Image: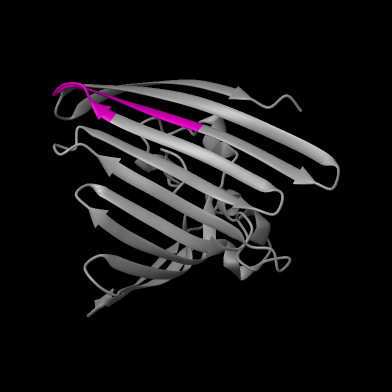
Amino acid sequence: HNVGKVSATADIGFGRRAQEFSYNDVGTTLTAVKQAYVSYTASDKVKLTLGKWATHVGYELLDAYANRNYSMSYGFSYGPFFHTGIKADIALGGKSALMLGVANPTDYVSAPSSVKVIIAQFSTGSANDKLKAYLNFQGGTGLTQFNLVVTGVLSEKWNIAYDGSLQSTKQGTENSSWKSHALYLNYDPLKNFGLTLRGDYFDDRK
């Protein structure tokens, strides 16, 4: 709903999928709340958002039916799924934009500690929108994740996308890391029929 420069969004879900999405809140009434946030458009270049929203990291979407593959890649299954905090979306001119924010630890509505993470995204694209790129980040005490998404329109019937992530974590003296690469090739021979192939490489040595 929108009222002037203020908008509010509530996204509710039930069942196993919603529980997997809000796995840290299973057993509470918060499990059903997939997203709940308020945004304020401060100017034509800046928008502020407060609440819980779906992550900016990755190419795939949280609602499986909205993905061409339906199934999720290994990289996306490792998350993050959502963030709870505050962020600013800033238009930089042309096709470029910047998002900066502060959020609770990954996939937590209520933070188990005072530790916060920094989230960010730089997005840009070609003038005709046939090439788009998104460099995503989340990082804080013991956590660093970089993610790159690039999409391209090859022709009227073919388009391609790449989604790559590198995450490292440290808890005490324990270090761990994983990386993923996913390549999507989409072919639409007809207006109402399309084919998608996803190649997925995931590496978590531990």
* Residue range corresponding to the magenta coloring: 152-164
- In percent of the image, x 45 and y 68: which residue is there? 36
Q: Position of residue 167 (x, y in %)?
A: 62, 38
Magenta region includes residue 20: no
Q: Position of residue 10 (x, y in %)?
A: 41, 68
- In percent of the image, x 43 and y 46: which residue is there? 63
Q: Is residue 1 above or below residue 197?
A: below
Q: Is residue 95 above or below residue 36?
A: above
Residue 120 appearing in the image: yes
Quadrant (top left, top right, bottom left, bottom right) of the N terminus:
bottom left
Quadrant (top left, top right, bottom left, bottom right) of the C terminus:
top right
Magenta region includes residue 158: yes
- In percent of the image, x 71 and y 69: which residue is there? 114
Q: Is residue 81 above or below residue 7?
A: above
- The picture quadrant where one finds residue 98 is bottom left
Residue at the outermost front position: 92
